[in-house]
Amino acid sequence: MDSVLEVRNVSYLYSKGTPFERVALDDVTVSFERGKITGLIGHTGSGKSTLVGLLNGLNKPLSGSILLNGIDIWQKPKEIAKIRYKVGLVMQYPEYQLFDETVERDIGFGPRNQGLSDEEVGLRVKEAIRYTGIDADLLSKSPFELSGGQKRRVAIAGIVAMQPDVLVLDEPAAGLDPKGRREILGHLKDFVSERGASVILVSHSMEDMAMYCDNVVVMNEGKIHSNGTVSEIFSRADELISIGLDVPSVARIAEKLKSRGITLDGELYTVDGVKAAIRKYIGGANNDL
Amino acid sequence: MISDITLGQFFPGNSPLHRLDPRCKIILSVLFIVAIFIADTPIAFAFLFLVTLFLIIISRISAKVIFKGIKPIIFVVVFTSLLNVFLTVGKGAPLVEFYFIKIYTEGIVRAIFMSLRVILLIIGTSMFLTYTTSPITLTDGIESLLSPLKVIKLPVHAFAMMMSIALRFIPTLVEETEKIMNAQKSRGADFSSGGIIKRAKALIPILVPLFVSSFKRADELAVAMECRCYRGDINRTKLVKLEYKIRDFIWIFVFALILSATILTKFLPDMITRASEVLDILFYHI
């Protein structure tokens, strides 16, 4: 497997040496495949956000290393800012980071910090709004006039405009309605296929994982619980349920049917997959359906 | 990290200090502060130092936490001590003379007293107020202590409510600042290099979002309070009523004694000389 980011034996503690000390990551080793969308799931407090903060060098792991294209990101601590352009991190609720007078200037903040010319920044902004589905009319508006979903997309565009090799999104669709989710996540595939970039998508929603991701990494209590392709992970739905995660509702239907003696096969984590499997099962017994 | 600052943080517990009435603790802090500012002899400082040590021991708060609490002010203390050492002009001959630098004994003594004063002040008051009193009980205490001022139409309740809201949101604001800083760092913002103007400019991407979200939060909080029919202190009753216990009076009495003892130390040398004079005269006559 060609991995773009590798996490090797990484551990991290919060509030080290105080009564509030808490282990956030415990000897985590995992790698993220180049050119793919990898989902990162786990319930609250499983260490997802901590891991994400380590990937672009916001925090330094207490032990272990993080390799970007095979090179330790902390090899030259003074140049960690450059790593942040290569591993673009969209934090949770990123709309809170908007500050500039116009949407265009705000999206261009990252590229300007990279030291690009005005012309180049302009091109980057145009490209970024295409990948995030923002109307060009919005560019001259103040970011504070926009709706919640639009703000969110502008914030994501601000990271996309830096043209990172790896785009890391921490719960990009949290608090949005299904339409808003589709608008934000739907464009990710274009970004990956056209730019050859890789994406790491942190989410609670198994439906999103099933729909948009190629691979899935499951985290539990600061450790990697399992990792593999979407079908590998969701074929073990019972395990995910046992660590308190939700599986896609259709996968739960398949699971229930299985416990009643009806074993389906196929892609049992998307609506279409389960539909096809049920049809096949019933079709075998009764050709009328 | 910013969130590691412990000054002004409440540590839940059940020590004798935690159980005291908040009004009592405010009064005790005031007595203690007055004692610290009156003290100006080594004996008085040694005495107040022991009192502080006693408070730390019975509060069962770890020394590490307390040390972390005073860490942020150490620079100020050292800086003012140095000013005192170098700028105080004493009566006798200078202790050290080096070109224009003259150090007098008085300067050193003053610097030591000043540092002790600041450190004891911070530890003493945070022992009573911040470390052992939750912000809510503290403002309850303030409101109750100030309630006589309602007679002259001072909005005591509003004042207390403002304080408790402000205190409550300090950690939130710190957390938020950290989050926004991380978000802007992820976009390549640089807060730690360049000249003053460049650094001040680098703060804009932090301050704007911080203000926006603070206003938004204030608005949301106001709406939430109104939804629960908040109308200031009109007809508002308390779940936990503050009541003075005997132990509160004992503590206040003891601290009044401590304060008087500190005042007495001021006159101690004077009294000793006067007493010896009296004795001299007596012996002379015998």
Image (spheres, rainbow, N blue to C red):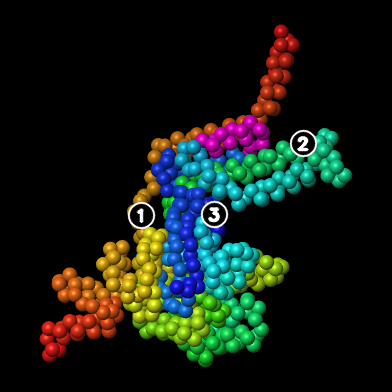
The reply, left or right, for residue B65 in relation to residue B95 is: left
* Earlier-in-chain disc, 1 versus 3: 3
Which one is closest to the eye, mark 2 or mark 1? 2
Which residues fall within the magenta stretch?
Answer: B38-54
The quadrant the C terminus of chain A occupies is bottom left
- Subunit that carries the residue with mark 2: B
**Residue at image location 41% in from the left, 81% down from the top:** A185
Q: Crowding at label 3, few (<14), some or many (≥20) Cα neighbours within 10 Å?
A: some
- Kindly report the secondary structure that dominates the magenta region of the rendered protein: helix
**Residue at image location 55% in from the left, 38% down from the top:** B52
Label 1 element class = loop
Distance between the alpha carbons at the discs numbered 1 and 3? 32 Å
Whether tag 2 and tag 3 are in contact, CB under 8 A, the answer is no
Label 2 element class = helix
Q: Is residue B42 magenta?
A: yes
Give x and y (percent) for residue B16.
43, 39
Distance between the alpha carbons at the discs numbered 2 and 1? 56 Å
Residue picked out by circle 1: B238
Residue A198, compared with residue A25, is above or below; it is below
Amino acid of disc 1: Lys
Distance between the alpha carbons at the discs numbered 2 and 3? 36 Å
Residue toward you, A27 or B12? A27
Mark linked to residue B105? 2
Which one is closest to the eye, mark 2 or mark 3? 3
Mark linked to residue B5? 3
Give x and y (percent) for residue A49.
45, 66
The quarter of the displayed image where residue A57 is located: bottom right
Q: Crowding at label 2, few (<14), some or many (≥20) Cα neighbours within 10 Å?
A: some
